[in-house]
Amino acid sequence: MESPARPLAAAAPVKAAVSSQERRRGQRVLLRIRANIHVALQGKATTLDAATLSVTPQGAVVVMKQNLAVETRLVLEHGSTKQRVDCKVARPSRATAEGFHIPLEFDAPAPGFWKINFPPSDWRPDDV
């Protein structure tokens, strides 16, 4: 006599790969703006020159000659408007011939900081 069929073991759920675009909280815009970074280095207030490579309502990637450690607290000053926003270094920088590409995250979203209109969150480049 055959034994009753056993239920198959349940497969563990597979986590779908998430693209880097889906991980982002908003659309990145390539935009070059001069900026100042106000930061305390070794306990001394310092202002460093920077320029944005890309911007979002939540932050930016800036290029600088000086590297900054992850979680470094700083104030980013818009070069044209002189408006300031508190932020931190979000992830490790990437060294390039141009300087260090440093990802910054604002303490709170500031969509008006860059003085541009960002594309809608559901916009895709292939929609053009």
Image (cartoon, rainbow, N blue to C red):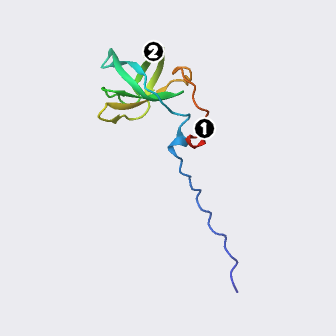
Alpha-carbon span between mark 2 and mark 1: 28 Å
Task: Kindly tell me whether residue 104 is visible in this rendering.
Answer: no
Which quadrant, please, contains the C terminus? top right
Question: Residue placed at 29% from the left, 34% from the top?
Answer: 97
Question: Residue placed at 49% from the left, 27% from the top?
Answer: 59
**The one of 10 and 67 positioned closer to us in this rendering:** 67
**The one of 18 and 44 positioned closer to us in this rendering:** 18
Which quadrant, please, contains the N terminus? bottom right
Q: Where's residue 60, x and y in %?
A: 46, 28
| Earlier sequence position, callout 2 versus callout 1 | 2
- Label 1: element kind: loop
Task: Kindly tell me whether residue 7 is visible in this rendering.
Answer: yes
Q: Where's residue 63, x and y in %?
A: 37, 28
Question: Which of the 4 image quarters holds residue 36?
Answer: top left
Q: Amino acid at mark 1?
A: Trp
- Label 2: element kind: loop
Q: Amino acid at mark 2?
A: Ser
Q: Is residue 97 left or right of residue 75?
A: left
**The one of 90 and 55 positioned closer to us in this rendering:** 55
* Farthest-out residue, front: 128
- Vertical order, 6 against 123 (above or below): below
Question: Residue placed at 32% from the left, 28% from the top?
Answer: 67
Give residue 123's mark: 1
Q: CB of mark 2 within 8 Å of CB of mark 1?
A: no
Q: Residues within 10 Å of mark 1 (few under 14, many from 20)?
A: few
Q: Where's residue 74, x and y in %?
A: 41, 21
Q: Residues within 10 Å of mark 2 (few under 14, many from 20)?
A: few
Give residue 80's mark: 2
Q: Where's residue 112, x and y in %?
A: 56, 20
- Vertical order, 47 against 95 (above or below): above
Give residue 79's mark: none
